[in-house]
């Protein structure tokens, strides 16, 4: 049963990502990815419930185009960064609040360098995609967002991305503290 649920979760995420890339990412694609994430979260909770014999809602609720979990609001945005540019992906979350990267996928048109930044300070290493390639940072499960993510901005700083040589396009899944 757990294997079937895990396969279903993988299909849901892949469908959401594929749908997001083949549709208008600024609209339906974001909703498709959120639907896929919600399906993955539900399946993950189902697996946990099966293991411990309980039922739970994980403390999450759907709010239009976002999802909340343990004091964090989860959202998705498209990434469209020109070559040799620094672009603000997510504006500051407010005083005492940070932005947490919980998933990301993207591709570069040519070989280059991509770096995530908290305002002007690097919060990732220099990522070096080859021409017409990219990577995926798998989404952190919603019940673990309060514990960790891939990287965090400092309090009250924007999440920026800098490219050198390449353009970079993809989808960012992030959380902001409530």
Image (cartoon, rainbow, N blue to C red):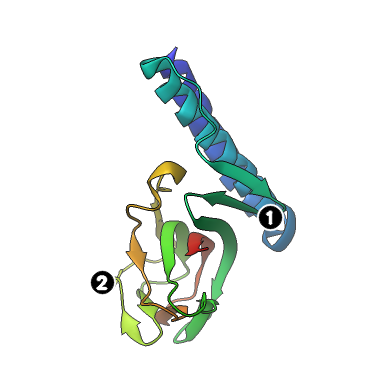
Q: Quadrant of residue 80?
A: bottom right
Q: Residues within 10 Å of mark 1 (few under 14, many from 20)?
A: few
Q: Earlier in the sequence, mark 1 or mark 2?
A: 1
Dot 2 corresponds to which residue?
125
How far apart are the two marked residues, 1 and 2, measured between alpha carbons? 30 Å
For mark 2, give the secondary structure.
loop
Dot 1 corresponds to which residue?
65
| Count of numbered tags | 2
Residue 98, can we see it? yes
- Asked if residue 168 is positioned above or below residue 171 in the image, the reply reads below
Residue 14, can we see it? no
Q: Is residue 167 left or right of residue 130?
A: right
Q: Is residue 170 left or right of residue 50?
A: right
- Asked if residue 25 is positioned above or below residue 44 in the image, the reply reads below
User: Which residue sits at x=59%, y=65%?
Assistant: 78
Expressed as whole percent of the image width and height from the top left, the position of residue 134 reads 41, 59
Q: Nearer the viewer, residue 170 or 101?
A: 101
Expressed as whole percent of the image width and height from the top left, the position of residue 32 reads 66, 46
Q: Are the residues tagged 1 and 2 within 8 Å (C-beta)?
A: no
Expressed as whole percent of the image width and height from the top left, the position of residue 56 reads 51, 28
Q: Nearer the viewer, residue 2 or 148?
A: 148
Q: Residues within 10 Å of mark 2 (few under 14, many from 20)?
A: few
User: Which residue sits at x=67%, y=59%?
Assistant: 25
């Amino acid at each position: 049963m757990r294997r079937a649920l895990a396969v279903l979760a993988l299909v849901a995420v892949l469908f959401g990502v594929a749908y997001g890339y083949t549709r208008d990412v600024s609209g339906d694609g974001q909703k498709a990815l959120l639907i896929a994430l919600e399906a993955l979260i539900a399946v993950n909770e189902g697996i946990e419930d099966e293991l411990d014999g309980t039922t739970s809602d994980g403390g999450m609720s759907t709010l239009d185009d976002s999802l909340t979990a343990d004091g964090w609001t989860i959202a998705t945005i498209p990434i469209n960064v020109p070559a040799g540019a620094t672009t603000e992906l997510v504006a500051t979350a407010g005083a005492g609040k940070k932005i947490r990267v919980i998933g990301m996928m993207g591709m570069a048109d040519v070989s280059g360098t991509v770096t995530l930044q908290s305002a002007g300070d690097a919060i990732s290493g220099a990522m070096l995609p080859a021409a017409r390639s990219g990577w995926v940072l798998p989404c952190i499960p919603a019940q673990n967002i309060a514990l960790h993510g891939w990287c965090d901005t400092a309090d009250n700083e924007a999440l920026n991305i800098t490219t050198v040589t390449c353009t970079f396009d993809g989808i960012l899944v992030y959380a902001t503290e409530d």
